[in-house]
Image (spheres, rainbow, N blue to C red):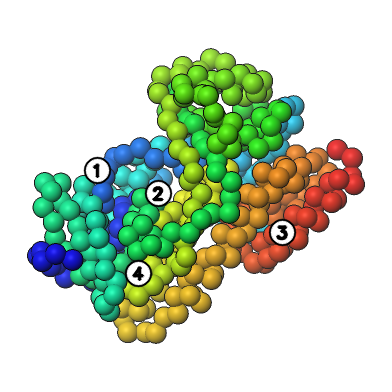
Amino acid sequence: MPNTEMEQRQVVVIGAGPSGAIAAALLKRRGHDVLIIERQQFPRFSIGESLLSHCIDFIDEAGMLDAVQAAGFQVKNGAAFACGGEYSAFDFGDTFSKGRPTTFQVQRADFDKLLADQAERQGVEIRYEHEIINADVSATRPVLQARRPDGSEYAVQADFVLDASGYGRVLPRLLDLEAPSNFPVRKAVFTHIEDRIDCQGFDRNKILVTTHPEHRDVWFWTIPFSNGRCSLGVVAGAERFEGHDDLDACLKSFVAQTPSLAKVLQYAEWDTPARTIGGYSANVKALHGQGYALLGNAAEFLDPVFSSGVTIAMRSASMAAGLLDRQLRGEAVDWQGEFAEPLKRGVDTFRAYVEGWYDGSFQDVIFHPGSSPEIRAMISAILAGYAWDARNPFVAEPKRRLRMLTEICARVPA
């Protein structure tokens, strides 16, 4: 690295999103010096707006729950699924794991800024519009090269670095840690609308996941907010978007092909230009290394279908903060056995059901009317984010249990 001014810090967190804010706050609450370096200025737009119940556990742990509850976000008590004339709803108050019965649906610009502000109020320093441009982890204490908004550069040496940079994937890019995902390349086109929903049976307290009536691998999210607006998006293989250069027309066309969703949104005011993101599924060679660990989407992102991204991010933040606190106090910590492997178990649970969603087997289970209340409670626990609760048979053995359920659904008439 070039000769520049060198700053000494205990912990540097890259990114002020949910995982970064929570990890930083948890470490600060344990008495450690924490600096967050964030490339953007908050508030800033982001998707991932439908939180799972497990998220509330980590928000509470970080001392931010009162502020989140006071912010007026839309309460979410479950998830609903629709396909043609079929409809199936899961209530987070009725889960095997007996976790939090409600969570929130949030506009991430406001939500992320709220968490970051809460971290600052607890004493965390945040530098917005500062970008990490290089990283050297060859020595015992890693060194980050950063660029200020005015273009000048400086270096920070830390005892430890947590990468919470989300889709920016700072350390995976700089340290050549990126690995290909085994998921097909998919794309999302999305917007915010004034929804004006006046449809009997529509529940604003749930995310609505709607499957295209002809293409089971094409699905929509409808996430109502408390201000009469909602987030709307369609997800499909990248090839299904070929020739759709007008994003607004593309999204409207997919909705028009899906009568049940078109009915829900028939009075909507489409007042915001659509956006797109593609090729978002990602993986890394390792979740940690000498002097650093990767959190949330900086490490791995599966798919938006079950809104697992923020939950995985917050779970990884809580786990990493606890381990790092011990390490900074002189304890020996096994980052592979105590962080990477336990985190991966929950991620792999989500992965099994994401794969089952796209091959149709999990959709068969969700929409089958013959599922017992006990089985539905086990599935609901996963949809609520409790994918690390190994007492749940559908967490302990996700692939085998899903295969078993699929076979039962095939034998029992709908």
Residue 109 in the image: state x and y as whole percent.
35, 39
Is 34 located above or below residue 377 in the figure?
Answer: below
Name the amino acid, label 1: Gln
Cα–Cα gap, marks 2 and 4: 18 Å
Disc 4 or 3, which lies upstream in sequence? 4
User: From the viewer's perspective, is residue 359 above or below residue 10?
Assistant: above
The disc at residue 41 is 1
Q: Residue at x 73, y 43 (%)?
A: 360
Residue that appears at 89% across and 44% down: 412
Mark 3 secondary-structure assignment? helix
Q: Quadrant of residue 370?
A: top right
Earlier in the chain: of badge 2 and badge 4, it is 2
For residue 359, side relative to residue 126 (left or right): right
Of badges 1 and 4, the one in the foreground is 4
- Do the CB atoms of the residues marked 1 and 3 lie less than 8 Å apart? no
Mark closest to the chain's N terminus, 1 or 4:
1
CA gap, disc 2 and disc 3: 28 Å
Q: Position of residue 134 (x, y in %)?
A: 25, 60
Q: Disc 2 designates what residue? A: 167
Residue identifier under label 4: 292
- Rounded to the nearest whole Å, what is the CA distance between mark 4 and mark 3? 32 Å
Mark 3 = which residue? 399
